Structure formats: C-alpha cells, structure tokens
Image: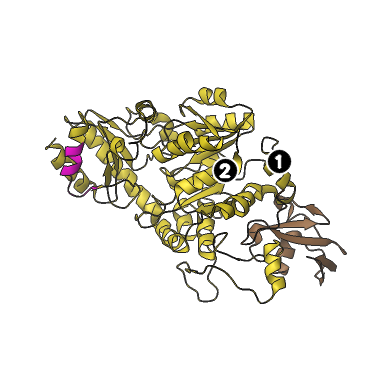
Amino acid sequence: MKLTINGKPTETPSALSVTALLENQRVKMPDMVSVELNGEILDRKAFPATLLKEGDQVEFLYFMGGGSGGVPWN
Amino acid sequence: MNATVLQPDTLVVHGGLEPEQATGATAPSLVQSNAFAYPTAEALEDVFAGREAGYVYSRIANPTVAQFERRITALENGVGAVACASGMAAISAMVLALAGAGDEIVSGTSVFGGTFSLFQQTLCRYGITTRFVEPTDAEACRRAVTDRTKLIFVEAIGNPKLDVPDIGALAAIAREKGVVLAVDNTLPTPLLFQPGRHGAHLAIHSTSKFINGHGNAIGGIIVDCGSFAWDNARYPHLSVLHKRARNLTFLAFLRNRICRDLGCCLQPFNAFLMSMGVESLGVRMERHCANAQSVARFLSGHPRVRAVRYPGLAAHPDHALADRQFAGRHGAILTLRLVDKAACFRFINGLKRARNLVNLGDARTLVVHPASTFCRELDDASRLAMGVTDDLVRFSIGIEHADDIIQDLEQSLKKV
C-alpha cells in the first residue's frame, strides 16, 4: 500500500500495524520514536493494534533524540 | 518463574543493551566525540527537527551516555532516563524542569546535605521555596502541599539519618494532589528497591555511588517511571507539550530544554566507566548488605558505642517498613555515635583500612564525620533535623571480608 512517511511517498506491505511499520522501515531507536498518524500522536500502547491503511500520513518524531527534538516549546 | 521477566541480577548485565553490530564488542563503545557529522544539510536538519533519530552534539545526547541511560531505565523499569554530570546536577535539572519562580517543593528533612543546601540556600534565591517535612510523616507531607507545589522529594533511605519513608503512602498523597513524587534511590539502588513499583513518578540517582561502585566517576540520572500523566494542569509548561510528546513529555523537556540549556551533561568516559561498574551491582549489593548487617550487629553490642543506626537492626524505628520495602535487605550505610566529636576523630584516625572521605557506595569501606564535613555549613536546627550530631560517624560498608572490616573497627574502638 502507499503511505506518506515523513512527507515522502512510500510503498509498504499492506495491513501493517504501527509496530510492524517501525520494523519494516528499520526505524532507529524504536523505543524512543513517537508516531503521528494523520495528524494525531498515537499512544505507544496502541502501536501493535493500530493498523495502517492506504493513503495514511505517518510522521516519526524523536523527542528524546540528539537534536532539539522538534518540540514546539513555546 | 516467568521466563520473559529478567531478575535484577541479570538485568544489570544484559538490560538495555543492544549488540554492537559493527564489531561484536560486549563492552560499551566509548564515543568520545563532541559532535556528529551528516552527509547533507537536509539530513542534519531532519535530526534537529526530530524527524530522524541521531546525535548532533554530546551536550545534548551521546551514544555512550545513551547506552548507560538505557541500562538504568531497564533497572528502574522506567520509560526513559536523562543522565547528568552528577547527582546534584540531576536533582537541580529535575527541579528546574518542574518548578519556577513562585513555586514550591516539599522535601524530606533527612536528605543529603548538598541537596538540603540546594533546596534551602540556593533555589530560594531564584524564587523556589522548599517546605521541609519529616519524610516518615506522610500526613505532614499532605499538609505541606499547596497549589504551588510542583514536587515532593524524599530519599528512599535518608543520608545520613537512615530513616525510611513509606513510599507507597507518599505516592498515594502525590496521586491525590496531582503532584510529582521523586525518590532519590541512591542508597537502596534498583537492586533493593524500585520507587516506580511503589507509585513514585521519578527515580533519581547519584550514579557516582553504588551504580558506579568503584569511586572513579561522578554522575547522576533521572528516570521517568511512566506513571505521571503530564497533561496535568499543575504543570502548564509540560501539559502544552503533552499533545505532541505524550509519555515522553517530561524527558523531552528535561533533555531538550533544561539539560541542553544548563549544559549539565554526563561525560561519555564517565558513562563508560559506570556502564561497566553497574554490571556487578547485583553481587556487590548482596555483599554490601550482608557485611553492613554483620558490622551493625557487632557495633550494637560494643561497650564504647553509644548507639548504632541501621535499618536492618530490629531496634531501628523503621525496621519493619524497611524490611518490607527493601525485601529483607537494608543497604550498606550505617551510623554510630560515640561520646563526642573528639572520640569520633580518634576513632576515624585509628582505622587502618576504612578510608576517611566524603563518598559512599565504593567497593571499599568508607568512613566520615558528617558534622565537620558535608553538613558543616548547615545550622544546628537543620543538622539535627537531618540526624547529624557532633558524636556521629557514618560508614559506607564495603565488599571486603566482614571479619576484616570488623577487626579494623574493633582495633580502633579500643583507642577511643
């Protein structure tokens, strides 16, 4: 299926859970990544049960990484 | 036996570790680099924007430090951790991430002298007021919490008073009031006690002590135990971030705002030493506790010792709670009282192996006279509240053979 991941069109196997997507995309530091699905941040506990569908917009966000984390501080 | 949940003794060796794929190395890699290069400007921008994982500058994060953070997170069963330059840096950063001018802290009286000084002497200059309460009096703690309280802070075992607060009771108050409860877990270590399992929200350590275990690296760490809902209106600066960062809200603010701006980062080499030191924490704590119990028993019956304080002794006022809370082990720290300060000095000077210095949690037995050292600048009332008198000597019992430790103490007591 076609997803948009971090703004880039990406082809993935169908019916992936968010947990499986992290693996499929070889996301670095999966325990530290936050996932935004169609504009909503997912609860980490929901990763295994949340299935992705064609056209979903997915953003991976690192709030605990080495950069400033992209957090809107103010 | 649950095959998927590792015992703490195993976690200290394996917890939070990922195989070093490039080399197969089992020891942590020491990444002694200030900054990290990227092939393109876009790639570096992605890391800064949080779209990609990566390291940019070791003041904010460093691979060796991150590995150490993962190990302690695993031991405390937390969500994540931020390591700092020292235990005091960790406490300072934690407070500044929670409180600002006009806010209040409720702290146990029996905290380490440096912590007491930070709360009483330093933070008040920046508008943060501390209300001190007996940490073993949960109701006093409840009464001290106001609308401005941003933190309840206690030590799991007070240093050097060695009192033991009921963390479950304090956690119930913290939950009821919607205030963060942080527990300094330096003395019990995660091997004896995990504050998060008793309802505390943050666990904090001076990792220079038992976690390091060898007296060769200074460091501290703050672990988010994962039980505080950071969308709480008491913390508006955090609740606004919660929409984005969710359960990582506090850690993200702590690392990417407070620690980044203060520059209180743990050095990679110290993280490297502490990552290796922590692997033997299980066996060290076993020996520390057994030795301390033997020494406490010996001192209890000694005619020249006026009083011995150790949570493992039945005579200790918090013994039953300590027994329950720490599963029958009581740590390495004990204190004794002689007739006066001069007797304490003669006793310390007469010791042949115990080293006279202001540290604890080393492999070797350490001794210190608190009133003339780390509690020197505090007034009499504060010292008394902390259980520090002129006739008090503190020991951090090491992992030597118990007979040799006792022999050293015995020969010196003869000179008192």
Q: Amino acid at mark 1?
A: Asp
Please report the bounds of the magenta region as a residue range: B345-355
Secondary element at image label 1: loop
Q: Vertical placement of B168 versus A48: above or below?
A: above
Q: Nearer the viewer, residue B69 or B25?
A: B69
Q: Are both tags, 2 and 1, on one chain?
A: yes
Give the left or right position of residue B199, taking residue B32 as reference. Answer: right
Q: Nearer the viewer, residue A62 or B411?
A: A62
Based on the displayed image, in which of its 4 quarters is residue B314 positioned? top left
Give the left or right position of residue B136, taking residue A17 as reference. Answer: left
Q: Which residue is mark 2?
A: B96
Q: Amino acid at mark 2?
A: Leu
Q: Quadrant of the N terminus of chain A?
A: bottom right
Question: Which numbered dot is residue B231?
Answer: 1
Question: Which numbered dot is residue B415?
Answer: none
Q: Position of residue B146 (x, y in %)?
A: 61, 26
Q: Which chain is yellow?
A: B
Q: Position of residue A25 (x, y in %)?
A: 72, 69
Find the residue positioned furthest to the front. B125
The Cα atoms of the two marked residues, 2 and 1, are separated by 18 Å
Find the residue positioned furthest to the left. B415
Q: Vertical placement of B140 versus B289: above or below?
A: above
Q: Vertical placement of A19 versus B307: above or below?
A: below
Q: Residue at x 71, y 42 (%)?
A: B239
Q: Position of residue B101 (x, y in %)?
A: 60, 36
Give the left or right position of residue B157, taking residue A72 as reference. Answer: left
Q: Which chain is brown?
A: A
Label 1 chain ID:
B
Q: Is residue B190 visible?
A: no
Q: Position of residue B348 (x, y in %)?
A: 20, 41
